[in-house]
Amino acid sequence: MSRFAHIFILTGAGISAESGLGTFRDTGGVWSRFSWEELATPQGYARNPQRVLDFYNARRTNLLAASPNPAHTALARLAAHQAAGGRQLTLVTQNVDDLHERAGSPDVIHMHGELLAGWCVSCGWRGHWAQDMPKGGGCPACGDDGQLRPDVVWFGEMPYQMDLIGERLMLADLFVSIGTSGSVYPAAGFVDEARRLGIPRVEINLEPSDNGWMFDRTHHGPASTEVPGWVDALIAGSW
Ligand code: BV8
């Protein structure tokens, strides 16, 4: 049985890599092939909305063809185990995919938004959106043309639910980082906050991340084997 009352987990693109969704900063990663300034900033969207919409349309198409991998499934199993024992698990993801939800994780906090959500910058409508987003596509609420964007957090925009994330981190007795390079803030700063709070910290990643030195324990290898192995050991009480 898990000996932790409240586990706080942060995931990044690495947990979805084996589901076929690209990571950002690995060799051949998304930002080595595309310009984040042009495709993941409000300024890039203002300059050329269709180029940005096409970039997210392609990623949305990939996501709809992808499936959760054993790492996503293991975290859903851990959430159920914690709940069955009256213990907590907070899952915060930097990812905009819905693979945690499809694997069965409840209450996922998407601090960088969601690829399957749309936002009308004209009337403020936000909601589920799973098809291509054409420039000039009418908003379902106000019908305004050409004001729809993916509801994701671009560089220079405030990540979502930061107050809730801070409250949950203060309640945690274990901080776990899975599949992230630790290079994008404020998410990359969570491990330092956990260290300041005296919370034990573990990194599960293919290789040491930029802030890997801040962790007490590390498990290096592919998430689809490392995460299930860690969850099994935690539930067995041997981790
Ligand atoms: C903000 C959009 C302020 C959605 C993304 C200090 C403090 C605060 C901000 C900053 C700061 N310094 C700089 C900033 C600005 C900036 C920033 O951090 N820049 C960096 C590059 C230096 N931060 C921001 O702009 C943030 N906003 O701070 O706002 C503010 C304040 C007031 C008012 C208004 C605003 C917003 C950041 C979010 C940007 N959006 N994406 C999308 O298109 O997806 S960023 C992008 O990076 C993705 O969201 C991604 O999730 C995120 C993090 O990347 P990772 O998930 O870590 O992915 P990466 O490829 O880097 O690493 C993958 C890892 O997996 C690797 O380590 C690899 O080894 C591992 N791996 C690979 N395969 C596997 C594996 N592990 C296990 N198994 C495998 N099989």
Image: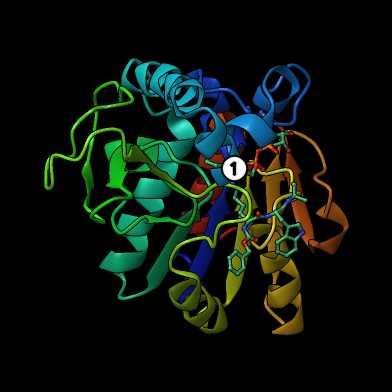
Pinpoint residue 50: horizontal percent, then vertical percent: 44, 22
The residue labelled by disc 1 is: 43
- Residue at image coords 67%, 21%: 34
Q: Is residue 229 above or below residue 224?
A: below
Pinpoint residue 152: horizontal percent, then vertical percent: 44, 45
For the question of whether residue 103 can be seen, the reply is no
How many other residues sit within 10 Å of disc 1, few (<14), some (14-19) or many (≥20)?
A: some
Q: Nearer the viewer, residue 95 or 172?
A: 95
Q: Nearer the viewer, residue 27 or 168?
A: 27
Q: Is residue 40 left or right of residue 91?
A: right
Determine whether the residue tagged by mark 1 lies in a helix, strand or loop. Answer: helix
Q: Is residue 3 left or right of residue 84?
A: right
- Residue at image coords 27%, 27%: 136
Pinpoint residue 90: horizontal percent, then vertical percent: 43, 65
Pinpoint residue 209: horizontal percent, then vertical percent: 80, 45
Q: Which quarter shows the N terminus?
A: bottom left
Q: Is residue 144 above or below residue 54?
A: below
